[in-house]
Amino acid sequence: MEENKSSIGSIIGTIIIIALIILGGLYFWGKRIEESKNIQSLTEEPVTEEEIQAERDAIVETNSSDELSSIEADLNATEINNLDSELNVELE
């Protein structure tokens, strides 16, 4: 009878340890998903129709000529001030 109690105790202990490992894994997995959603929401900014149209107009306005003066004019007309604004997102 003494052997029967010790084998049941070891089985129950093993089940509890496995359950704790599974719950811990689920907790960290959920935490990782939440962090990726937070990072994604920080980087996604709503784009207005006016911004899209302005970009389209800028592309259409570029000259297809390969003359140096045309290339230089297109380069000077290109807005590069906020080019890296998406990269400057602070992560928590």
Image (spheres, rainbow, N blue to C red):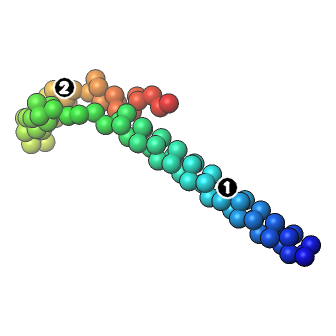
Is residue 91 in view from this perspective? yes
Amino acid under disc 1: Leu
Q: Quadrant of the N terminus?
A: bottom right
Q: CA distance from mark 1 to mark 2?
A: 62 Å
Amino acid under disc 2: Asn
Which residue is more in the foreground, 67 or 59? 59
Q: What residue does disc 2 label?
A: 76
Asked whether, in this view, residue 51 is left or right of residue 88, the answer is left
Q: Please state which of the two labelled residues, at mark 1 or mark 2, is closer to the viewer.
A: 1
Which residue is more in the foreground, 27 or 82? 27
Asked whether, in this view, residue 37 is left or right of residue 59, the answer is right
* Residue under the image location 71 percent in, 60 percent down: 16
Tell me the crowding category of disc 1: few under 14, some 14 to 19, or many 20 or more residues within 10 angstroms, Cα based.
few
Is residue 68 in view from this perspective? no
Asked whether, in this view, residue 15 is left or right of residue 82, the answer is right
Which residue is more in the foreground, 14 or 5? 5
Q: What residue does disc 1 label?
A: 20
